[in-house]
Amino acid sequence: DVKVTQSSRYLVKRTGEKVFLECVQDMDHENMFWYRQDPGLGLRLIYFSYDVKMKEKGDIPEGYSVSREKKERFSLILESASTNQTSMYLCASSLRTSAPREQFFGPGTRLTVL
Amino acid sequence: AQSVSQHNHHVILSEAASLELGCNYSYGGTVNLFWYVQYPGQHLQLLLKYFSGDPLVKGIKGFEAEFIKSKFSFNLRKPSVQWSDTAEYFCAVKGQAGTALIFGKGTTLSVSS
């Protein structure tokens, strides 16, 4: 069973703080993704990575950065948190093969920025 | 750019009613299509997927979806819903060249017993 875990279920931070969201998967997946989920907007892709130290911008990368130093771990960084980054953050992973594969999701981190 | 449209924002049904949730996508090439479900307080999980072959795809919990290429549609169906189907449903598409999924905005299904 694929397992994607995220470091926190709930997080409260103050405006201007640096925030780290951690994601770990245990199935040796090459691809990892960070999405944010907002009511009425669905899931929007922030960044993804298809290999260690590789990263690609998604649809809404502004205000975020990522780090992938190890295959199983993908971190999302908010350099200076702002109130409009209050959201649910979802991490996902998938195999990278010639045939498409589904993404497996973590439980999410609900971040509130005050 | 690829996009996914889910026509219904919120659907309210009684138990045993039939369900159809609409999903249309904009990509004209070969696509891979998915329906994910998020039960209250739980992870997003895969309901079903279409990669190729039979356009009628069966998933978990009695759900099915039909890929109609000419209509760019992948509607989700269930003949008789249960209270436990109350959840948010997301349609997603992956284009041939892409790695990430493009998600629709989601449809909230509320089933009353």
Image (tube, coloured by chain):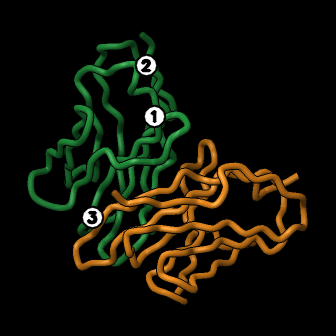
The secondary structure type at the circle numbered 2 is strand
Which mark, by number, is residue B31?
A: 3
Compute the Cα span from label 3 to label 1. 22 Å
Compute the Cα span from label 3 to label 2. 31 Å
When asked about the image quadrant of residue A34, the answer is bottom right
Which mark, by number, is residue B8?
A: 1
A24 up-or-down from A85: above or below: below
x and y percent of residue A92 in the render? 48, 63
The secondary structure type at the circle numbered 3 is strand
Whether residue A44 appears in this view of the structure is no
Badge 3, how many Cα within 10 Å: few under 14, some, many 20+?
many
Whether residue B51 appears in this view of the structure is yes
What residue is rendered at 27% in x and 64% in y? B31
Badge 1, how many Cα within 10 Å: few under 14, some, many 20+?
some
> Which chain does green denote in the image?
B
Say whether residue B40 is left or right of residue A38. left
Say whether residue A43 is left or right of residue B32. right
Say whether residue B40 is left or right of residue B31. right
